Image (cartoon, rainbow, N blue to C red):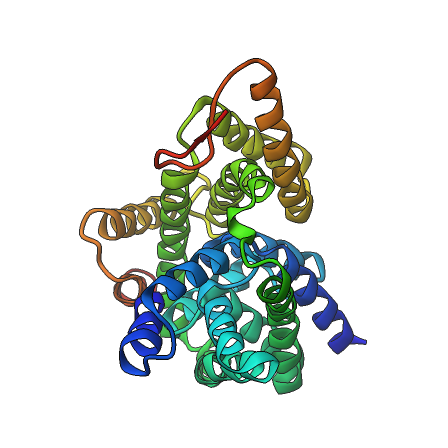
């Protein structure tokens, strides 16, 4: 049952997606490729499109993966799975445990959790680089991709250019270089 | 999205105070899920209980849901086009850069002492060598945090729990 599988997968992702934003990308990538719903390269395109849409990137990824895998019902079921843990946990905290983030054990946990999340994102950057030939054999093709990578990194760190603009410009570079 | 939420609920609608919304953002960051969605659910709950939470969740999700569906349809429709294929070769390299930058930005507030450095570097090595599932890494991170603080306490080392000031002894 594909819809049930999508639901349980994104429900699980929803429960562990601490940190928000790109912190959830490695977990989604791992699940999507293990289930054979997409390749890492296809998922890279999903991130690009999710990043161009308003709203949280991880939720957008869930919507796209669900839609790609099982159409509109898939998109709805994946989104519901992804946000259900949020609403359940927040209802519990709002009712009984408003000082949650002030709790010392929560703080202790985050002391270890934050660097692990950093490691997860860094490792997924390496994985995405390998799957998309940014790390690859010595050739002009690899070199050109490293150049786009380097320029994008420069643009996002030094010029604070908006990611949407970087995605669009790199698309133009792609058309010029590879079409 | 966070400044937008604050402007709407505090200044325009005057539903809650600045102090409350700051508190809500802090909690939204420490529970799983997207911060903007978590904040919306929380604001909804404060104003109108369970129904408010559900309403706010749907409200914050619906626009982005349809935009993503629209873009997905467009993408699936044009992905085999010669020029679009070429464009995405370039775009994928840029996405790798954006993810690398995300790691750097998260690292800025997460890695600030020897323990956090050690945990971050070890996690990359463990992921590379053992291919551990990210969920186990996250559970491992929670346990590592709890254990590390107590071990350091045992040896009389003070742990800085967040990058800015705050210490426990």
* Quadrant assignment, res A7: bottom right
B9, B118: nearer the viewer: B9
* Quadrant assignment, res A15: bottom right
* Residue A102 versus residue A92 in the image, above or below: above
Q: Is residue A35 visible?
A: yes
A45, B65: nearer the viewer: B65
B56, B83: nearer the viewer: B56
In the image as oriented, which residue stretches furthest toward the left?
A159
* Residue B12 versus residue A111 in the image, above or below: below
Residue A110's x, y, as percent? 54, 41
Q: Is residue B72 visible?
A: no
In the image as oriented, which residue stretches furthest toward the right?
A1
Q: Residue at x 65, y 68 (%)?
A: A88
In the image as oriented, which residue stretches furthest toward the top?
B155
Residue A176's x, y, as percent? 26, 64
Residue A63's x, y, as percent? 55, 75
Q: Is residue B127 left or right of residue A117?
A: right
* Residue B49 versus residue A144 in the image, above or below: below
Q: Residue at x 59, y 66 (%)?
A: A90
Q: How many marks?
A: 0
Residue A167's x, y, as percent? 32, 64
* Quadrant assignment, res B67: bottom left
Q: Is residue A157 left or right of residue A85?
A: left
* Residue A114 versus residue A91 in the image, above or below: above
Q: Is residue B148 left or right of residue B81?
A: right
* Quadrant of the rendering where the N terminus of chain B is positioned: bottom left
């Amino acid at each position: 049952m594909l819809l049930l599988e999508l639901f349980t997968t994104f429900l699980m992702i929803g429960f562990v997606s601490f940190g928000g934003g790109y912190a959830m990308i490695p977990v989604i990538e791992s699940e999507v490729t293990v289930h054979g719903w997409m390749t890492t390269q296809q998922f890279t395109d999903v991130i690009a499109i999710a990043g161009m849409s308003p709203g949280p990137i991880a939720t957008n990824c869930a919507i796209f993966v669900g839609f790609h895998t099982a159409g509109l019902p898939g998109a709805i079921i994946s989104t519901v799975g992804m946000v259900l843990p949020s609403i359940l946990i927040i209802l519990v905290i709002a009712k009984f445990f408003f000082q949650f983030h002030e709790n010392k054990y929560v703080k202790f946990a985050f002391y270890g959790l934050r660097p692990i999340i950093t490691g997860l994102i860094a490792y997924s950057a390496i994985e995405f680089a390998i799957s998309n030939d940014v790390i690859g054999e010595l050739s002009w093709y690899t070199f050109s991709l490293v150049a786009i990578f380097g320029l994008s990194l420069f643009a996002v760190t030094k010029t604070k250019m908006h990611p949407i603009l970087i995605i669009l410009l790199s698309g133009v570079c792609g058309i010029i270089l590879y079409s | 999205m966070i400044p937008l939420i604050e402007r709407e609920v505090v200044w325009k609608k005057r539903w809650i105070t600045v102090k409350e919304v700051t508190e809500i953002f802090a909690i939204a960051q420490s529970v799983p899920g997207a911060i903007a969605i978590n904040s919306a659910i929380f604001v909804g709950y404060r104003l109108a209980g369970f129904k408010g939470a559900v309403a706010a969740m749907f409200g914050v999700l619906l626009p982005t849901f349809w935009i993503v569906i629209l873009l997905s349809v467009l993408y699936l429709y044009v992905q085999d086009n010669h020029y679009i294929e070429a464009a995405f070769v370039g775009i994928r390299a840029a996405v790798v850069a954006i993810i690398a930058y995300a790691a750097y930005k998260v690292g800025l507030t997460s890695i600030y002492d020897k323990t956090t450095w050690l945990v971050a570097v070890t996690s990359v090595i463990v992921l590379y060598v053992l291919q551990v599932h990210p969920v186990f890494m996250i559970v491992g991170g929670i346990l590592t945090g709890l254990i590390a603080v107590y071990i350091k306490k045992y040896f009389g080392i003070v742990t800085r729990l967040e990058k800015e000031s705050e210490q426990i002894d």
